Amino acid sequence: MSTIRLGDIAPDFSAITTEGTINFHEWLGDGWGVLFSHPADYTPVCTTELGTVAKYKDEFDKRNVKVVALSVDGLESHKGWVNDINETQNTSVNFPIIADEDKKVSELYDMIHPNANSNLTVRSVFVIGADKTVKLIITYPASTGRNFDELLRVIDSLQLTAYHKVATPANWSNGDDCVVVPSVATEDIPSIFPKGYKEVKPYLRLTPQPNLD
Ligand code: BEZ
């Protein structure tokens, strides 16, 4: 078991998947990645989750994000279950699913929480940046299906704040005003943010989202 924290290099691994063996870092290339685990194949919540992710492929592609799922079930199980997902969710699974039967990747990413379930992975999500560092970690219990709109929202925020001196306020979504980071002095804002700004308090300065026309 290893502890992974934000800012760490995402541990590299090779694994058998429904799309062949992948070497994680090589597979990511210079794009962003999402690695997410689910408890088990042929279970209802997971079926809806993987179907939803397949339908969001264009959204992940637009953001240059590759997605890979994982459970501790084997390859043949994954392949049979993918047929069910495609049938019941009216989609076509278009991303690899890791068959982590030996729990190598699950343990590397601390996806098994023994006091929740000693054999199965929880619903972990790791977002990995183009620099291979871990940008986001979220953990859900088996009983709660994830909100993939929220995942896209956070990726939008991560990709925005990686390149601009802004942060995103509560409930921000793409297009909303952003917060100027505290390290930018108020007198420097006009040259950095030509769209203008509003000073609500000296420590709370808002500016239109800088990466939109
Ligand atoms: C599910 O995906 O439906 C599920 C998996 C494990 C426990 C509970 C629900």
Image (cartoon, rainbow, N blue to C red):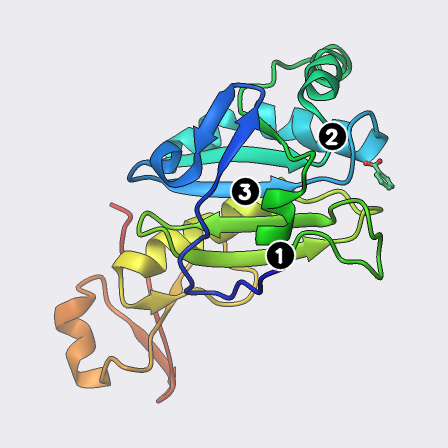
Residue at 76% across / 42% down in the picture?
145
Marks 3 and 2, the one that precedes in the sequence: 3
**In the image, what residue type sits under mark 3?**
Leu
Q: Nearer the viewer, residue 33 or 198?
A: 33
Element marked by disc 3? strand
* Residue 174 seen from this side: no
Residue 127, disc: none
Vertical relation: 73 (above or below) 3: above
Give x and y (percent) for residue 121.
73, 46
- In front: 8, or 83? 8
Mark 1 vs 2, N-terminal side: 2
- Residue 54 sits in quarter: top right
Residue located 16% across and 73% down the image: 190
Mark 2 beta carbon near ligand 1 (under 8 Å)? no
Amino acid at the residue labelled 2: Asp
Mark 3 vs 1, N-terminal side: 3
Query: Residue 97's image quarter?
Result: top right
Q: Is residue 161 left or right of residue 36?
A: left
Q: Residue at x 42, y 63 (%)?
A: 8
Q: Which residue is mark 2?
A: 73
Could you tell me how far apart the alpha carbons at marks 3 and 2 are, in whole angstroms?
16 Å
Q: Tell me the SS state at disc 1.
A: strand
Residue tagged by mark 1?
138
Judged by depth in the image, the label closer to the viewer, 3 or 1, is 3
Above or below residue 194? Residue 55 is: above
Q: Is residue 122 left or right of residue 175?
A: right
Q: Dot 3, crowdedness within 10 Å: few (<14), some or many (≥20)?
A: some
Residue bearing the label numbered 3: 35
Q: CA distance from mark 3 to mark 1?
A: 11 Å
Quadrant where ligand 1 appears: top right
Q: Residue furthest left?
A: 191
